[in-house]
Each structure stands twice: as C-alpha cells, then as structure tokens.
Amino acid sequence: MTKTRNYVFEQVSKLKEEVPWISLVNKTPVTKLENIGEEYNIPELYMKRDDLTTNIYGGNKPRKLEYTYGKIFEKKYEGIVTLGGLGSNHCLATTVFSKKKFNKTKEIKVTLLLMKQPLTADVQKKLLMFNNLGANIVYSGGLLGVAYNYFFKRYKNFYKLWAGGTDHITNLGHVNAAFELKEQIEDGELPKPDIIFVTLGSVGTMAGLDVGLTIAGLDDIELIGVKVAMNILWFGCTLYSERKSAKKTLKFIRKYTDKFNSIKLKKRKVLTDYVGKEYGYVTEEAKNALKIVKDLENIKLDTTYTGKTFAALLDYVKSNPVSDKSILFWNTYNSRPYDPFRKKDEDWRDLPKDFHRFFLEKLY
Ligand SMILES: Cc1ncc(COP(=O)(O)O)c(C=O)c1O
C-alpha cells in the first residue's frame, strides 16, 4: 500500500507551514461488500478500509496521531499522557506510535490513565500489550479518578491528550480522508455514496469527515453517525459536540485561506439507539452484525464501536429502501494482527498489582 497524500495541505499551503504533522497513513482501499449486499438487498454496499490505515496498526487513530505526534516532536515533549477504557484502541494506537520503530523519529514515554469498562478477552489482551510496549499504566477507577489524575497530577514535559485523541487539529486527519475518498470516486473505485455510516465516540472522525466532505464538494452525501457512548465519558458524544468540533475545525482552516468562506456545513444525523447499557456494553445487535461481517466478508469488526455502527446500518436498510442507493460503511477498527505487540512469555502477573483482578474476574 502507498502512503496517502496530505490533500488538505495541498489545498491550503499556509496550513502546511503552521501545523506540525508526520506521515503515518496509507491510502486505504474500498471494498465492495458483495455477499452482504446480496443477502440484505443492498446492491451498492461498500466499506472504506480504514482498518488498514498503516501496515502495523490500522483504524481511525493513526489519522489523528499524524498531528498529535507532529506536535509532540516539534515541541520536543518527552512523553504523552492520555486516557481511555481498560481496552482502549486509542490508548493502544498512541502507545504503538510512541515507539521509534513505528513513528520513525523518536521514542516517546507513555502514561495511560485507564478506567473501568466491561471486561472482555480483548480488554485483557490490550492490557498485556500496553505493558509489553512499555507504557506506564495507571488504574484510575471511574471517570472521576481519571479526571483527577489527568488534571491535577503533574507530568513534566508530557503532552496531554484527552480520550479519543480528538481536537480541532487532529480532525484534519479525517478532513484529509474525505479528499482521499473523493479521489477514489473520481478514479472509479466506487460510485459516489449517497450515505456514509460512521461511528461517533469522541466525535473527531465524524467531525473531520463532515468538514472534509463539505469542502471537497461532496456535501450532498448524507453522513450518519452512530453514538457508542453515554455523554459523560467524552463529555458530549452527541450531534451537538460533533457540530461544535466540525465548526471549530472549519474556522481553523479558514484562518489560512479564504477559499471556503462561502461554504456552510450541512445538517447531519446521529443515531442514538445502539449504545446498550453503557460504553463497551456488548449488545446482541452488535454481536450479530459482527458475525454477519465475519461470516460473509471475512472482515473483523468489534463490539464496542464498529459492530454497533454496522448494526445501525442493517436496521436502516430494513426500514428505508436503498436498492437504488450507494452506501459506504466507514470502518474505523484496526484489523492488523496484534502479533508484533505480544510476547511469548507475557504474564499478567507482570502488570502493576491494580490490574491483576482483571485477569481473575469473570469475562463478559
Ligand atoms: C474502533 C473505533 N471506532 C470509532 C471510534 C470513535 O471515533 P471518534 O473518537 O473519533 O469519534 C473509536 C474511538 O476510540 C474507535 O476505537
């Protein structure tokens, strides 16, 4: 796979001078989901394979981390402190790209403030990998404990990054992704989608795509977010927060160009019925969607994020006729194998004591 271009910098050259950035991400393919399309009567169903964003670790996080690590290297931070659930993909991606062998620049120290989430085998693997990769992991209980450790403890010369890694600058990663998609449409890799389904967590992925589709001239594509967390974890996993974040990113881009002055963001929709009891809760709909995508297309989704979004897509097509519409599922989950981050002799007893209980309690 080849690296993607920074289309946003090409569009707005002054941004390139102002915004630190490193290149991590490949141009990801688009796959037609023929088997699911046939079974569920969605003749034009496609998946943007952002599960393959880098050769080592995929998913939506590397698109954001290009800007996060750009800033860390430019400002010469020694480390990064961030937070997430015990099995956070954001924490794993951040830890992976803190390694010199993966960021190709410099080793960065990592402190992860982790909070409780429903315990699954994947959560246990993540904890082992954080430890194998040398992250300093701190169990902080619930959100209050995490917030206390994040806001009130001192991390000298560490860059602070909130859960999910979203801000108005890291959103540029997904603004860029929209331009990448535009090129793929122009190259005939897929028809222009009528609808895109994407997961909504800390809102950055959707907000970036929202701005990107608008300024790339694809604003007639309907962008539908699927909420996967109660508001408290990310302060606002809501359409309102998405709008706020998108507006801030557009305003930021406009500081460096007057090209997009007349452009207005479109109305967007967020589906809110798929979270289940709490963030990370394994719903029957998500499990079922995961099985369908695995059995029919041999692509692995997860139960916290993408399984819920695919479940929403399947429900949507049941109640809305789509036989003449093209639908794109934006896959944000890493599908690269964990092998490079595992060790043959890894043992949970080597983790800090606070984490041992997560290897003794019953799994979900
Ligand atoms: C697999 C996956 N999909 C989607 C999301 C949500 O993306 P965002 O936080 O940009 O809304 C996350 C966030 O952690 C994730 O890990």
Image (cartoon, grey):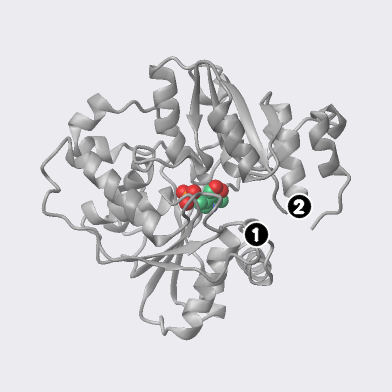
Q: Are marks 1 and 2 in contact (CB under 8 Å)?
A: yes
Q: To which residue does mark 1 refer? A: 303
Q: Secondary structure at mark 1?
A: loop
For the point 22% across and 44% down, which residue is it? 251
Any part of residue 332 in sight? no
Q: Relative to residue 28, is residue 229 depicted above or below? A: below
- State the image coordinates of residue 353 (x, y, percent, origin top left): 83, 30
Would you place residue 41 above or below residue 300 in this image?
A: below
Which residue position is annotated with label 2? Answer: 120
Image position of 178 (left or right of 113): left
Q: Mark 1 vs ligand 1: CB under 8 Å? A: no
Q: Residue at left 50%, top 38%?
A: 162
Q: Earlier in the sequence, mark 1 or mark 2?
A: 2
Where residue 130 is drawn, which disc sits there? none
327 over 56 or under it: above or below: below
* Above or below, 310 relative to 318: above
- Helix, strand or loop at label 2? It is loop
- Residue 72 in which image quadrant: top left
The quadrant in which the C terminus is found is bottom right
Q: Is residue 287 left or right of residue 153?
A: right
Horizontal side of residue 261 vs 176, given as left or right: left
Q: Quadrant of residue 148?
A: top right
